[in-house]
Amino acid sequence: MSSYRVALVGATGAVGTEMLRQLHKRGFPASEVVPFASERSAGRPLDGTNGPVRALVPGADISGFDLALFSAGGSRSREWAPRFRDAGAVVVDNSSAWRMDPEVPLVVTEVNPEALDAHRGIVANPNCTTMVCMLPLKALDRAFGLEAIVPTSFQAAGGAGQKGMDELYAQFPALLADREQLVVDGEAARGKVSHAVHEDTLAMNVVPLLGTLNDQGYTDEELKLQNESRKILGLPDLRVSPTCVRVPVMVGHAVEIRAQFRDAVDVASAREVLEGFPGMVLDDLPTPLAYAGRDEVAVGRLRADLADPQALNLFVVGDNLLKGAALNTVQIAEVLHERGLVRAAQPARA
Amino acid sequence: MSSYRVALVGATGAVGTEMLRQLHKRGFPASEVVPFASERSAGRPLDGTNGPVRALVPGADISGFDLALFSAGGSRSREWAPRFRDAGAVVVDNSSAWRMDPEVPLVVTEVNPEALDAHRGIVANPNCTTMVCMLPLKALDRAFGLEAIVPTSFQAAGGAGQKGMDELYAQFPALLADREQLVVDGEAARGKVSHAVHEDTLAMNVVPLLGTLNDQGYTDEELKLQNESRKILGLPDLRVSPTCVRVPVMVGHAVEIRAQFRDAVDVASAREVLEGFPGMVLDDLPTPLAYAGRDEVAVGRLRADLADPQALNLFVVGDNLLKGAALNTVQIAEVLHERGLVRAAQPARA
């Protein structure tokens, strides 16, 4: 039986920590798990790894790995993923660096695992908000032919990692200290706390901007919803009208989706195809808090559109650190293992 | 100069308190403000009124009023608004009781003040979520011809009144006491606090259900967005695909709106018509907390749709207790005064 030497890059972050937990919890056949992180963390022992943490710096020994699971940000992935690949590992990357590269499969394991067969040494894990939408949308696309979506997200602070959660959590005491001010002079309340990760005060608030704006007024986070959805679902012409909003929740992304189809839809048939889809549960009232720490993506508030017989509305919830990130990464590693694709990596063309 | 005897019905609630403040702040020409509330509050003195609070019970003296401003819930409005009207007052009602009655004007003062001319003694104030959407949508309808909207709301606890804010505020200490639990076992965190006003634990969460579900899976709150928007904008065929979600914010509703038009739209022209509209400001990053306690409705994140040249996306924010409720009610009273419509009430047909 196969057993792999696994590099865990970004091992001390929110997603890296969860990846490690998932490798153990799911019994992934790793003979060794070697943690890598920034120089700041180097030398620290890390439970459950063959540590201590190694610094990802020029000259680091990255040889002999079968798999490298990355969650260390886009610029580190751009630099280091090809090095790990060239040294023989298959890289599964959680950043946005490689997702839209036509040679890189972008995979949600329940949705398009077959894309892994053509991997050339790097595989990308989708954006956490896109991820939770893909399961119900794939199920509905198969049944009715998906043509357009209007997704409006309610994204947790944890989508911005540990520092995103730290910032939100730290804001509550000052804001809760003066309840009346929250009602009569919110602007003063808002100014009492600082923000650096999120674009505005997030506690007791909602912030309709995540990431960087382009000239058309869309954020990179919103464009990911369009571009990654098209690639994962294999629907290059899918019309997407995305809005990404941050909400004061620690973990658990939610997305309201209006979906339009080629064929007429009915709720009973839609419910049937959703019920049969793996990794997903139907829940009449899915909330992000209820699914924090759970593997499943939950779908609820399923309604026929009031205005269009070919449209449905649904509310989707999923843990952004689990299915939205670490769980899917480890599930990709599992599929690579099951299909004998770990040691079949093809070096990419120069 | 005119001066009116004003009854304030529901004077001790969140909206009633704010109505009283608005009457004074805006210098409404009231010779007397008489507070009414449930028997529980009767006899209490109330600053700024010709108190004490009177109980709204059979036999209560409701004679001699020129105006009655109601925010006391639907069933009290259904029972008592006609009585005040028959006793000679013009009623401005903040509940949902009369809004869809074809003989009752449903008015946002910047949008359709002319509807007041035909009043027959009862005028309705719109739902707070609908209200904040009406200003930008009216401006855009005039310019481009509005045909369809997909509104997804982020509604504050204060939309459910004082008790809605009390419930949210009370939930924080228990939830914040165990940060790790919010991440690894949200279901346990969720179960630590009780809820009676909102449909689920609201602190550190998002609850995609407000009000009562009908057979088609829509809530009454969502249908208000459809039906009231059509009536206020005078667009009986407007297609509306509504979703109403409660977020852990004390005051300040937000609504993401995808709007489709008859004509092609461009952002520069849209910005121009929005800038010229009264009661509204453009703000690149409008958040509900920043507008808690402010009169203006704010519009931001204005974007051409990625998929449809006849569609725009925008994010709207407004204080649900002010423009969303008390302010608009008092503004209606002001228009009635300015147009000489207070003492021109026609008794409705039996």
Image (spheres, coloured by chain):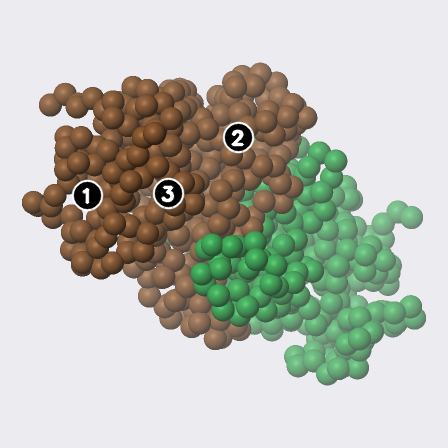
Chain colours: A green, B brown
Q: Residues within 10 Å of mark 1 (few under 14, many from 20)?
A: some
Task: Evaluate if marks 1 and 3 touch, with contact meaning CB atoms under 8 Å apart.
Answer: no
- Amino acid tagged 3: Leu
Along the line of sight, the residue nearer the viewer: B211 or A137: B211
Q: Quadrant of residue B347?
A: top left
Along the line of sight, the residue nearer the viewer: A108 or A77: A77
Question: SS for tag 3?
Answer: helix
- Amino acid tagged 1: Arg
For the point 11% across and 23% down, which residue is it? Answer: B350
Task: Evaluate if marks 1 and 2 touch, with contact meaning CB atoms under 8 Å apart.
Answer: no
Q: In the rendering, which numbered label is found on residue B76?
A: 1
The chain to which mark 2 is attached is B
- B67 left or right, relative to B183: left
Q: Which residue does the numbered mark 2 point to in the structure image? A: B278
**Which of the two discs, 1 and 3, labels the residue nearer the N terminus?**
3
**Which of the two discs, 1 and 2, labels the residue nearer the N terminus?**
1
Question: SS for tag 1?
Answer: helix
Task: Evaluate if marks 3 and 2 touch, with contact meaning CB atoms under 8 Å apart.
Answer: no
- Amino acid tagged 2: Pro
User: Marks 1 and 2: which is nearer the front?
Assistant: 2
The chain to which mark 1 is attached is B
Residue B185 visible in the picture: no
- A142 left or right, relative to B191: right
Q: Which residue does the numbered mark 3 point to in the structure image? A: B23
Q: Residue furthest left?
A: B59
For the point 24% across and 33% down, which residue is it? Answer: B66
Q: Residues within 10 Å of mark 3 (few under 14, many from 20)?
A: many
